[in-house]
Image (spheres, helix red, strand yellow):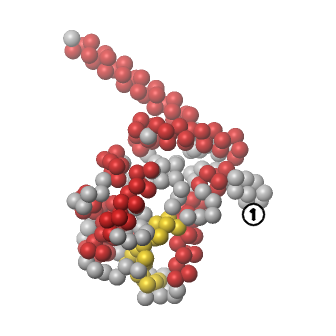
């Protein structure tokens, strides 16, 4: 039996990995699926974890990065055969999840062998997300077993010096920064605190609309969001100025 840790780099999977090793539980491999669109702080975190545990994390990278699949990949079948680019992963089918995660993991695990025990970092307060064993693999959920909630996991990591460069002080969840499913408050934070990433998103969106006809969100581009957020900021500033006048 080979014991493999599915490591996303987030608070839950990090806490799970650290505690598994601290308790001497079997860990034969640690795998991280690179979407090629993670926050820079996440890549720094992965390097920090490797140094802390003294072990190599296996990084699974697909043949093509996010931007290539979004703009250049030529579809091989179906009614859109021959057309280029999937566009933003904002529809019912999130092509990025299958391409960057499920397909990479399945291919890697098939190369390991038939008997695999797969650790997943699902916290105790999300136990409904657990699944039964399938495809001959044993699925293990140590955080549920330990009763560790999301809050417990974050504190567990903080206690060991992991901070993600402050990402969890800004976001409840840390995922690919290009995700169209991020809430508006998360997008506001990216625009305000990660201006270089926001500018990159805006340019990508312009290319995507021109090439595929798909905007960041259905009927809403990054430029639309940019204008909206700027308008909100201006209205807020006017309100603060008005309050200041009244207070005097």
Examine the image and state in which quarter residue 122 appears: bottom left
Q: Is residue 244 above or below residue 135?
A: above
Residue picked out by circle 1: 76
Dot 1: few (<14), some (14–19), or many (≥20) neighbours within 10 Å? Answer: few
Q: Residue 75: x, y in percent?
A: 73, 59
Q: Residue at x 35, y 64 (%)?
A: 51
Q: Secondary structure at mark 1?
A: loop
In-image side of 30 versus 101 (left or right): left
Q: Residue at x 34, y 49 (%)?
A: 165
In-image side of 138 versus 149 (left or right): right
In-image side of 162 versus 55 (left or right): left
Examine the image and state in which quarter residue 214 appears: top right
Q: Is residue 203 above or below residue 37?
A: above
Q: Residue at x 49, y 66 (%)?
A: 59
Is residue 135 among the parts visible in the rendering?
A: no
Q: Residue 142: x, y in percent?
A: 32, 75
């Amino acid at each position: 039996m080979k014991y493999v840790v599915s490591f996303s780099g987030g608070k839950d999977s990090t806490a799970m990995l650290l505690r598994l090793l601290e308790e001497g539980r079997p860990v034969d491999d640690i795998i991280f699926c690179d979407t090629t669109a993670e926050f820079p702080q996440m890549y720094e975190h992965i390097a920090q974890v490797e140094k802390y545990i003294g072990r190599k994390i296996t990084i699974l990278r697909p043949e093509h990065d996010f931007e290539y699949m979004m703009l250049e990949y030529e579809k091989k079948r179906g009614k859109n055969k021959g057309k280029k680019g999937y566009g933003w992963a904002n529809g019912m089918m999130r092509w990025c999840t299958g391409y960057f995660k499920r397909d990479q993991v399945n291919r890697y695990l098939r190369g390991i062998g038939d008997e695999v025990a797969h650790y997943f970092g699902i916290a105790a307060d999300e136990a409904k997300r657990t699944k039964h064993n399938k495809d001959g693999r044993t699925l293990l959920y140590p955080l549920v077993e330990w009763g560790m909630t999301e809050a417990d996991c974050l504190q567990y990591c903080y206690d060991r010096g992991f901070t993600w460069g402050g990402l969890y002080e800004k976001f409840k969840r840390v995922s690919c920064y290009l995700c169209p499913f991020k809430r508006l408050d998360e997008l506001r934070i990216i625009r305000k605190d990660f201006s270089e990433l926001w500018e990159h998103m805006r340019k990508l969106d312009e290319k995507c609309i021109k090439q595929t006809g798909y905007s960041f969100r259905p009927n809403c581009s990054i430029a639309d969001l940019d204008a909206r957020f700027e308008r909100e900021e201006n209205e807020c500033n006017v309100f603060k100025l008005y309050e200041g006048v009244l207070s005097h």
